[in-house]
Image (spheres, grey):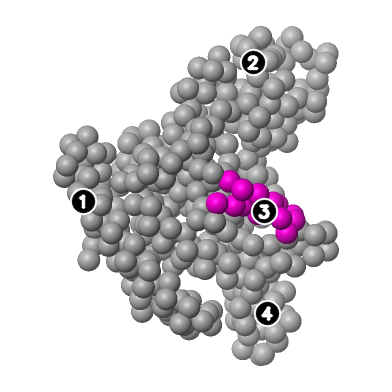
Amino acid sequence: MGVKLHNIISRDKIDYQELAGKIIVIDAPNIIMSLFNFSLKNSSSINQGLILDRTQRPISHLYGLLYRINFYYSKKIFPLFCFDGKPSELKRMITKDQLKDFIFTQRWYAQARQCGDKKEARNIALSKEYLWQNIIKESKQLLGALGVPYIEAPSSAESQCAYLVKKNIATFSNSQDFDSLLFGTPRVIQNISKSLRRKVHGKWQYKKITPLFINLKNNLRILGINQFQLVDMALMLQTDYFSGITGIGPKKALHLVKTHRNIESIIREEKKRYDFTPLTSELIYKIRKLFLLPTVLQEFDTFYWNSPNNPSILSLLCREHHLNRERVMNNLGKLHESFKKCRSYFNSQSSATKRVQTRLDAVSFGS
């Protein structure tokens, strides 16, 4: 979901040529979910628009990742994906034990397929216990086969992305959510898409999009606040970690923070106008710590981008999911060509510009 800050955050258009030769770290759950092509027409048909294979499992994320990686390479971009680790205790709408639920439903799904019960297999494949966990598992498998490196963060993917950009291991973070800014991501790219359009959530409609760049430092200067105050603003808004304060939106939160400086003063001065009861001192501490001092990986092995492994890709897409082999092979041919051109461009830029090389000291290429 993410915090709603789009009305107050300044975003600038950016050309793909400006992204060439750059490493972009991807908020994997956010981007993979955006690749999902479904329609929420009503509450009883939440999975109505999913594209399924003959085993009754979704395939939008697989085709989507295949196309997206080729698109990154075609634009001379090297992607680095980052996945969520252990969810925060504050995160809402999660099961108590996602891994245990997933292992159980995996076995249940396998039994249904073995018995030829297509309806039962479909119900399991689309269940909340199985669907998203399996999508993440298969996405990692496909990225590995495509030769694209990925990181499993100890906590949130967005906080890990922020760290990688802060340390100049990556130049930008790619996420559609504005939570990236709360974690202090210096440079965020949004709307990276080959089609230059994005599906309107819940409708079979699309809107035109262009790549947008968010500079956190510039935005904080324009807003007249600091990073600490940006997080205090989020304390009053609906996020993945708190339901927000009734009657307060982004513009009002900004006004209150600029007037009273911090959330403690806001609660003290505005308690007659708003109900701050849910926002306890303990919760304030936990959310501030989550955004300002997140748990992240600080040491990494060398990141390798390798040529796509055709046998592994075909095994997952064609043997396991029964996707059209000719169509997959056609896209793999394009992918190999894009990868070679991207690698050549990247190496030429690294050798020509010393500044570029200092940002890429943890990068290496396979065959």
Q: Amino acid at mark 3?
A: Tyr
Q: Which residues are magenta?
A: 196-209
- The residue to which callout 1 is attached is 347
The quarter in which the N terminus is drawn is top right
Q: Secondary structure at mark 3?
A: strand
- Where residue 206 is drawn, which disc sits there? 3
Q: Badge 3 local density, few (<14 within 10 Å), some, or many (20+)?
A: few
Instruction: Give the crowd class for mark 2: few <14, some 14-19, many >=20 residues within 10 Å.
Output: some
In the depicted structure, whether residue 303 falls above or below residue 188? below
Disc on the earlier residue, 4 or 2: 4
Disc 1, SS: helix
The amino acid sitting under disc 2 is: Val
Residue topped by disc 4 = 121
Which residue: 74% across, 81% down?
Answer: 119
Estimate how packed mark 4 is, as few (under 14), some (14 to 19) or many (20 or more) residues with alpha carbons within 10 Å: many
Q: Is 208 colored magenta in this rendering? A: yes
Answer whether residue 167 is visible to the viewer in this image: yes
How far across and down, in percent of the image, does residue 353 sit? 19, 38
